[in-house]
Image (cartoon, grey):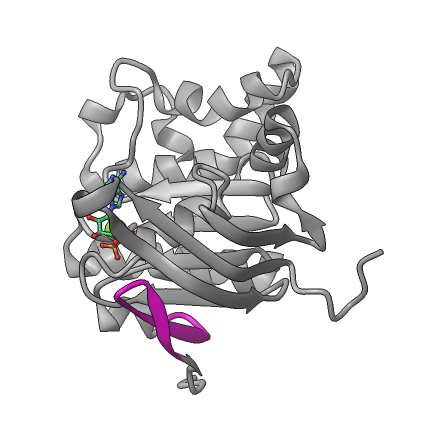
Amino acid sequence: MQTDTTPLIQLQGVSKIYGKGQAAVKALDAVDLQIHQGEFVAMMGPSGSGKSTSLNILGCLDTPGSGQYYFDGVAVGSLSRDQRAVLRRQFLGFIFQGFNLLNRTSAIENVELPLIYRKIPARHRREMAQEALCAVGLEKWQNHTPGELSGGQQQRVAIARAIVGKPRVLLADEPTGNLDSVRSIEIMEMLRTFNQRDGITIIMVTHEPDMAEFCKRQMQFQDGHIISDTAVEDTL
Ligand SMILES: Nc1ncnc2c1ncn2[C@@H]1O[C@H](COP(=O)(O)OP(=O)(O)O)[C@@H](O)[C@H]1O
Ligand SMILES: [Mg+2]
């Protein structure tokens, strides 16, 4: 049974190799990490250092080649495919650099999508999606399609979609990578609120030191290793 000190997320000796023979690339090399409920973590490091691979494993979008992933004390590798899908839908929310919205579909329908997979009844779905769009300040834009929205607004729709199911963990891969600095800061302030007010654990990949400053902990990746892992001083 899990205790207060059980990390919400734990990788133990996780390695991942892509390709075979001469072409093999070791994306992760025996990575250990622990993240507790309520943390706000930045994953940093040069391109190709293993950040996205780590995030995808944490999000059950990819599996370790070797080593173990524990979510709330449960060995994810011992779950069936269906059980992993449940873990992903119930407990995890995703935000990507490219927003990944359905282009011909209104903002509110994009936000409702994960609830359809969870078989939540239509009326309740609509209410939950409206609430999530409100939380990102887009209540007036719910019937607009992504093409009618700015980049910053599109990312806020994607964030609403990520939080609509009330996940315990938000996983974000360069969420501000396509945005200017004003829009980036708006997104980071929003994430900070979800972390501080709602207690959502957030793990975010970013290249940008200014964005990583919003996090409480910064990890540096290099060549498939975590080479540093430090708490960020509170600047408030
Ligand atoms: N699906 C894949 N097939 C082959 N190689 C991959 C794949 N995904 C990642 N890699 C390789 O693994 C290494 C780590 O990639 P990644 O985790 O995406 O790095 P980062 O997100 O830090 O830029 C890189 O060398 C990359 O080219
Ligand atoms: Mg990446």
In the image, residue 223 lies in the stretch drawn in magenta: yes
Q: Residue furthest right?
A: 1
Would residue 39 be seen by someone viewing this image from the given angle?
no
Along the viewing direction, whichever of 163 and 77 lies nearer the viewer = 77
Q: Which residues are magenta?
A: 214-228
Along the viewing direction, whichever of 137 and 59 lies nearer the viewer = 59
- Residue 143, x across and y down, in percent: 35, 19
Q: Quadrant of the C terminus?
A: bottom left
Q: Residue at x 45, y 66 (%)?
A: 41
Dominant secondary structure of the magenta stretch?
Answer: strand
36 relative to 169, above or below: below
4 relative to 229, above or below: above
Along the viewing direction, whichever of 51 and 206 lies nearer the viewer = 51
- Residue 6, x across and y down, in percent: 72, 65
Q: Residue at x 48, y 43 (%)?
A: 59
- Residue 213, x across and y down, in percent: 33, 75
76 relative to 126, above or below: below
Q: Residue at x 30, y 57 (%)?
A: 50
In screen coordinates, is 193 left or right of 105?
right
In screen coordinates, is 182 left or right of 7?
left
In screen coordinates, is 8 left or right of 173?
right
Would residue 232 be seen by someone viewing this image from the given angle?
yes
- Residue 8, x across and y down, in percent: 64, 59
Q: Quadrant of the N terminus?
A: bottom right
Along the viewing direction, whichever of 115 and 33 lies nearer the viewer = 33
In the image, residue 230 lies in the stretch drawn in magenta: no
The image quarter containing residue 90 is top right
Q: How many marks?
A: 0
